[in-house]
Image: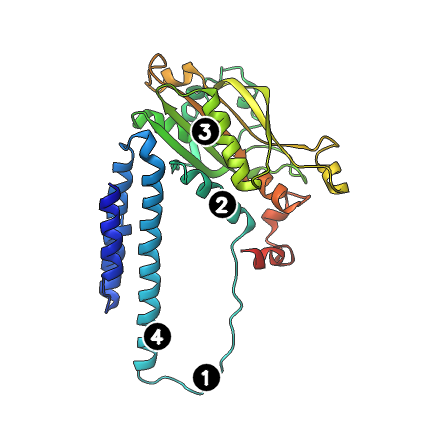
C-alpha cells in the first residue's frame, strides 16, 4: 500500500492541468465521494496494527500533495484568465483585503486530530440529533442514571427517544455496530447539555473522543497513548497523572491531569495551587458496551477517552471565560490571528 501511495503522489506531481474542467476532474478523482482517497481509507482499515502509523503518514502526504496541486493549479488558471481576459478595468482602485483567520477552537481541534492521526487514528462523525440507544443505553447507562434527567439533556419535543447528543460517544456505538475490529478512531463534534451558561460552562461545547478496540489492548496502551498526546500538544517535558474515576461505559476509569506548573500567579489560580490541571477522562471499554454492539469481549478489549476542546484551548491560551469562544467578538478573535 505504501508503494501504491508513492506512485499516486509521483503521478500527481507530473500531472499537467490546463483548464478548469481538468482541475475539477482531478479533484473528483481523488477527493470525491467515490474518489481514490475514500477507497484508500477503506483499505487502511485492513492494514495490520504495526504498519498503521507508516501508512497513515503516507495517506496524509498524499492528501496534502493533491490539495497543494489543486490550489497551485487553480491559482495559475485564475492568473491566466485575469491577464488574458477582455475588458479588464486597469483604473480599478487596488487595495488589500483584510484576511481572516481560523477560530481558536478550530485550530485546537485540527491540532488534536493531527496528533492522533499520526499514530493511526482516523476521524469518524455522526449526527447531532440522536436516539436513546446511541447516547445512553448502548453505552451502559442504566435507566435511572442522572445524565438521563431533563435538566442535563435537550430532548426533542413530542419524541422522548430523540435528543441532542450529550457526548460524541454516540459515534463510538455507531462505529462498533457497523465496523469489525480492529477499530482506531477519533470523533470530533458539537455536543449539547442543558446547563447554565457561565465562565466555566456552556450549553454547547465541542468534544473529541477516541476509541481503540483490538485483541490484547491494555490499560498500559491507553496510558502511553495519552502520554504521547500530552507531549505532542503541551511539549516534550509534559507529565500526566491518572486518578481513579467512574464512567458507565468504561471500567476501570480515570481522570487525566497534566502538570501545568506553579510559575505565575495565574498558574496558582487555575490549578488551585496544585500545579495539575484535568484535561480528559478515559478508561477501558466496559464489556457490556462491547456486547451491546455485537463485539465479543472474550476476544477483544479496548480503551476510550474524551476531552473538551474548549478546555484544552483555554489551557493553551490561558483564557479565563469560556463564553468568549461563542460571542464572535472581533476584539477577542484578533488576538489569535497572528498565531494561525
Using the image as rendered, state which of residue 72 and residue 218 is in the foreground. Answer: 218
Looking at the image, the residue that sits furthest to the right is 265
Does residue 228 appear in the picture of this structure?
yes
The image quarter in which residue 276 lies = top right
Which label was assigned to residue 79? 4
Looking at the image, the residue that sits furthest to the bottom is 91
- Of labels 3 and 1, earlier in sequence is 1
Which label was assigned to residue 169? 3
Q: Where is residue 28 shown, x and y percent of the image? A: 25, 54
Q: Mark 1 points at which residue?
A: 92
Which label was assigned to residue 313? none
User: Is disc 2 surrounded by few (<14), some (14 to 19) or many (20+) residues within 10 Å?
Assistant: some
Using the image as rendered, state which of residue 284 and residue 151 is in the foreground. Answer: 284
- In this view, 162 is above or below 206: above
Q: Mark 2 points at which residue?
A: 111
- In this view, 63 is above or below 238: below
Amino acid at each position: 500500500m505504501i508503494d501504491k501511495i508513492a506512485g499516486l503522489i509521483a503521478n500527481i506531481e507530473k500531472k499537467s492541468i490546463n483548464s478548469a474542467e481538468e482541475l475539477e476532474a482531478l479533484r473528483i478523482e481523488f477527493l470525491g465521494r467515490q474518489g481514490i482517497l475514500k477507497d484508500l481509507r477503506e483499505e487502511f482499515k485492513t492494514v495490520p496494527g504495526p504498519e498503521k502509523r507508516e501508512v497513515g503518514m503516507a495517506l496524509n502526504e498524499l492528501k496534502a500533495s493533491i490539495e497543494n496541486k489543486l490550489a497551485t493549479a487553480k491559482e495559475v488558471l485564475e492568473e491566466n484568465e485575469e491577464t488574458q481576459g477582455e475588458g479588464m478595468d486597469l483604473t480599478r482602485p487596488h487595495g488589500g483585503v483584510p484576511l481572516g483567520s481560523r477560530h481558536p477552537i478550530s485550530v485546537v481541534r485540527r491540532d488534536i486530530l493531527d496528533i492522533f492521526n499520526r499514530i493511526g487514528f482516523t476521524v469518524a462523525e455522526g449526527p447531532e440529533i440522536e436516539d436513546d440507544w446511541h447516547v445512553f443505553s448502548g453505552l451502559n447507562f442504566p435507566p435511572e442514571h442522572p445524565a438521563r434527567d431533563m435538566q442535563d439533556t435537550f430532548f426533542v419535543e413530542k419524541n422522548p427517544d430523540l435528543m441532542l447528543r450529550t457526548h460524541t460517544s454516540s459515534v463510538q456505538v455507531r462505529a462498533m455496530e457497523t465496523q469489525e475490529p480492529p477499530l482506531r478512531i477519533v470523533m470530533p463534534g458539537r455536543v449539547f447539555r442543558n446547563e447554565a451558561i457561565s465562565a466555566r460552562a456552556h450549553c454547547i461545547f465541542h468534544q473529541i473522543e477516541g476509541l481503540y478496540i483490538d485483541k490484547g489492548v491494555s490499560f498500559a496502551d491507553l496510558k502511553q497513548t495519552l502520554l504521547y498526546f500530552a507531549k505532542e500538544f503541551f511539549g516534550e517535558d509534559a507529565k500526566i497523572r491518572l486518578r481513579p474515576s467512574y464512567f458507565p461505559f468504561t471500567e476501570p476509569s480515570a481522570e487525566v491531569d497534566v502538570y501545568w506548573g506553579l510559575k505565575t500567579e495565574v498558574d496558582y489560580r487555575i490549578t488551585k495551587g496544585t500545579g495539575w490541571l484535568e484535561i480528559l477522562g478515559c478508561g477501558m471499554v466496559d464489556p457490556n458496551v462491547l456486547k451491546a454492539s455485537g463485539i465479543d469481549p472474550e476476544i477483544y478489549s479496548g480503551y476510550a477517552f474524551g476531552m473538551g476542546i474548549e478546555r484544552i484551548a483555554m489551557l493553551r491560551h490561558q483564557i479565563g471565560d469560556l463564553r468568549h469562544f461563542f460571542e464572535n467578538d472581533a476584539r477577542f478573535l484578533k488576538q489569535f490571528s497572528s498565531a494561525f
